Image: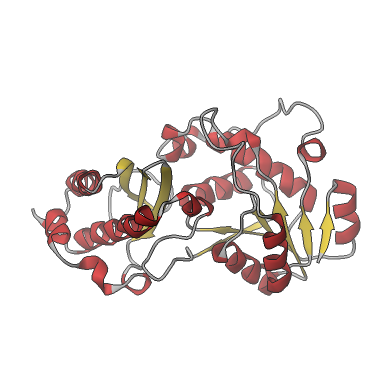
């Protein structure tokens, strides 16, 4: 695996390749990231991953200064997965001057859910992704569905700018108990890690309630939030939305349920496409009084 610290070096390494597949990351890699690299290897003639912790997408009170760095481990994992090029610029290489030109995504998509609770987040995401796309010039860009809204925002940006990039979404990689893998899971204490699976289990219950024919989605969302609060979580949202644009459902469109909640000091997000529920979670996720709490008419 070659490592490029500068944009000219990256271009030198990618010269002659016609089907570049790209996986942007912020490092602290886990099996979910590596599944994206494996997908990229199937699509391109050269696989590029990036590691860059993007200051622009962190709010002032968030964990930019303490975001975990696991460089040696990250490199080992990427090599083992068959990554060809790692683009790892520092801030001066990627932002040589104050970044006053920014990409502001459609507020209808970017200012809801995560964007409501983290104002400006998707502007930071879109700005760095656009710059990385400019540097790497990929034909394929691979993102995990765990960050579902981010995937939708990036796809919308690519369409709006007519970028010649196929944005590929990969299913969320989960632990055996259903918890979505995330770099921030490392912040959880042992007891919190045991409780953390409740977020994915709550999504299963919400999806089951919808499939069982409960039509008052507001009631399902409210009960799901109450369930999490009763277990010590601080939920920001549990929302059932159309997959196509994350707007409120108004018919028979395919749906997704998205959630964000804080457990102790750790904020976790997750989602579930409602038509593809049961194969991803242990059956024990849908038992007991918690199911009844969401299913009551």
Regarding residue 40, the answer to whether it shows in the image is yes
Judge by depth and name the residue closer to the eye, 130 or 119: 119
**56 is higher (above) or lower (below) than 227:** above
Judge by depth and name the residue closer to the eye, 243 or 287: 287
Tell which residue pokes out farthest to the front in this image.
Answer: 190
Give the side of residue 205 with respect to residue 95, left or right.
left
Provide residue 22's location: percent of width, then percent of height: 70, 59
Give the side of residue 235 with respect to residue 52, left or right.
left
Tell which residue pokes out farthest to the left in this image.
Answer: 297
Residue at 69 percent of width and 43 percent of height = 130
Residue at 64 percent of width and 49 percent of height = 26
Provide residue 239's location: percent of width, then percent of height: 31, 46
Provide residue 296's location: percent of width, then percent of height: 9, 55
Name the quadrant containing residue 144: bottom right
Residue at 58 percent of width and 68 percent of height = 35
Name the quarter where the N terminus is drawn: bottom right
Name the quadrant containing residue 105: top right
Give the side of residue 167 with respect to residue 138, left or right.
left
Residue at 44 percent of width and 60 percent of height = 180
**281 is higher (above) or lower (below) than 231:** below
**98 is higher (above) or lower (below) than 195:** above
Provide residue 68's location: percent of width, then percent of height: 60, 48
Looking at the rendered structure, the number of numbered marks drawn on it comes to 0
**281 is higher (above) or lower (below) than 235:** below
Regarding residue 254, the answer to whether it shows in the image is no
Colouring scheme, one of rainbow, by chain, secondary structure, one colour: secondary structure
Judge by depth and name the residue closer to the eye, 71 or 24: 71
């Amino acid at each position: 695996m070659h490592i490029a610290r500068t944009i000219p070096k990256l271009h030198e390494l990618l010269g002659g390749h016609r089907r570049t597949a790209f996986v942007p990351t912020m490092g602290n890699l886990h099996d979910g990231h590596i599944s994206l690299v494996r997908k990229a290897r199937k699509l391109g003639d050269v696989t590029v991953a990036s590691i860059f912790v993007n200051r622009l997408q962190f709010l002032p009170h968030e964990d930019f200064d303490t975001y975990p760095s696991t460089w040696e481990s990250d490199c080992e994992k990427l090599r083992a997965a068959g990554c060809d090029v790692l683009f790892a610029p520092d801030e001066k290489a990627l932002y040589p001057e104050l970044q006053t030109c920014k990409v502001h995504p459609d507020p209808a998509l970017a200012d809801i859910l995560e964007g409501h609770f983290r104002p400006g987040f998707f502007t930071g995401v879109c700005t760095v992704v656009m710059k990385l796309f400019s540097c790497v010039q990929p034909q394929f860009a691979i993102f995990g569905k765990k960050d579902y809204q981010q995937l939708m925002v990036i796809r919308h940006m690519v369409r709006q700018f007519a970028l010649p990039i196929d944005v590929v979404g990969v299913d969320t990689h989960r632990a055996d108990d259903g918890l979505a893998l995330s770099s921030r899971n490392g912040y959880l204490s042992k007891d919190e890690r045991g409780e953390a699976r409740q977020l994915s289990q709550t999504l299963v219950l919400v999806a089951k309630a919808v499939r069982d024919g409960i039509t008052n989605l507001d009631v399902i969302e409210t009960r799901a939030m109450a369930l999490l609060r009763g277990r010590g979580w601080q939920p920001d949202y549990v929302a059932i939305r159309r997959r196509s644009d994350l707007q409120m459902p108004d018919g028979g469109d395919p749906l997704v349920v998205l959630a964000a909640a804080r457990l102790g000091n750790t904020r976790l997000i997750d989602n579930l496409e409602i038509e593809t529920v049961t194969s991803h979670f242990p059956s024990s996720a849908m038992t007991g009084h918690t199911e009844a709490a969401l299913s009551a008419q």
